[in-house]
Amino acid sequence: MAIQEFLNVDLPKVLQRRADLVVLLVDGSILHVEFQSRNSRRMERRMALYHLLLLDRYETHIRHVVLYVGQARMRMHARLDSGPMQYSYSLVDIREVRVEELLASNRPVDYALAILAGGGEQHLTDVLTKIQNLPDEERKRAHAQLAVMSGLRSMSVKLELELTRMSVVIDVSKNVILQRIEREGEARGFAEGEARGEARGEARGEARGEATGRAAGQAEGLRFALRQILEARFGGVPKWADVRLEQAKLAQLKRWTGKAVTAPTLTEIIGAR
């Protein structure tokens, strides 16, 4: 075979990978679990790399599992075949697991995952009841995990309503994960509203320029999502507040959305009348 080109064989010397969950089992083997919220075309290569790195360190039997928790249909492959190297791992869509199995596991992390499982949305009250019965630190951690998981299924508003109905109070000031979510200022779980608003803004932007249209679309999407949150929390949006929402710029809408889930009153979100 004729040579086309000599390739540079200097490979990076520093390679950092952080696995989501690695546990040593009682039989001496290792279980490695990766949580994946999006389809990835490189998933099988990533998992093969994890396998080689873990094998080099621990030199024992390793079982790998990818737990898919995304909303879109799972389209990844569970096998790598590069010719001389074949590698496979387990690929599980969380929706294939019944919510009852996770609620019966007695593991706090399974309670948060339960809302993503098959039938999870219909058992939100059962999930919250399980979490409420946990010891203080485990309960805080599970609430934070639940807040993140609910965003993956556009269930943030429903979660907030159920927490209110059950009179559950989450102290955001003592919860690092929820503080980070609040600071991001994004309306988790309201992709539909943002997409709708972006489409409106981009339609207007055809006349004003693509950049202006994109900014208008983002503002319209946040405005729609913020109204949804306020209506769900406070039973409606008064006229003065609605006028303020219409006049607000994108940066202001982002700040308000970041406070909308946790602030106790409407005025603490958008200011006094």
Image (cartoon, rainbow, N blue to C red):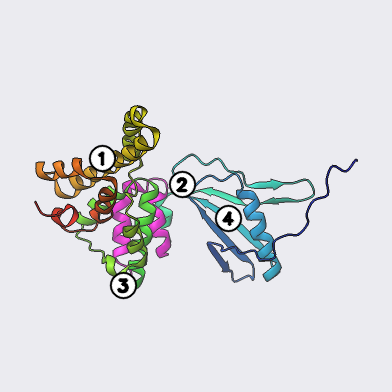
Residue holding disc 1: 224
Kindly report the distance in space between the C-alpha atoms of the residues bearing marks 1 and 3.
36 Å
Give yes or no for contact between labels 3 and 2 (Cβ–Cβ under 8 Å).
no
Residue 13 has which mark?
none
Front residue of 113 and 129 = 113
| Closer to the eye: label 2 or 4 | 2
Q: Earlier in the sequence, mark 2 or mark 4?
A: 4
Kindly report the distance in space between the C-alpha atoms of the residues bearing marks 4 and 1.
38 Å
Front residue of 174 and 105 = 174
Q: Earlier in the sequence, mark 4 or mark 3?
A: 4
Q: Check the image and report above or below for 272 versus 73.
A: below
List x then y, in percent, for residue 161.
23, 51
Spot the residue most to the right.
1
For label 3, the SS is helix
Residue 136 has which mark?
3
Asked whether residue 73 is in view, the answer is yes
- Horizontal side of residue 132 vs 233, given as left or right: right
Write the residue at 69% across / 61% down: 12
Q: In the image, what residue type sits under mark 4?
A: Val
Q: In the image, what residue type sits under mark 2?
A: Gly
> In this picture, which residue range is highlighted in magenta?
107-135
Spot the residue most to the front.
208
Kindly report the distance in space between the C-alpha atoms of the residues bearing marks 2 and 4.
15 Å
Residue holding disc 2: 70
For label 2, the SS is loop
Residue holding disc 4: 65
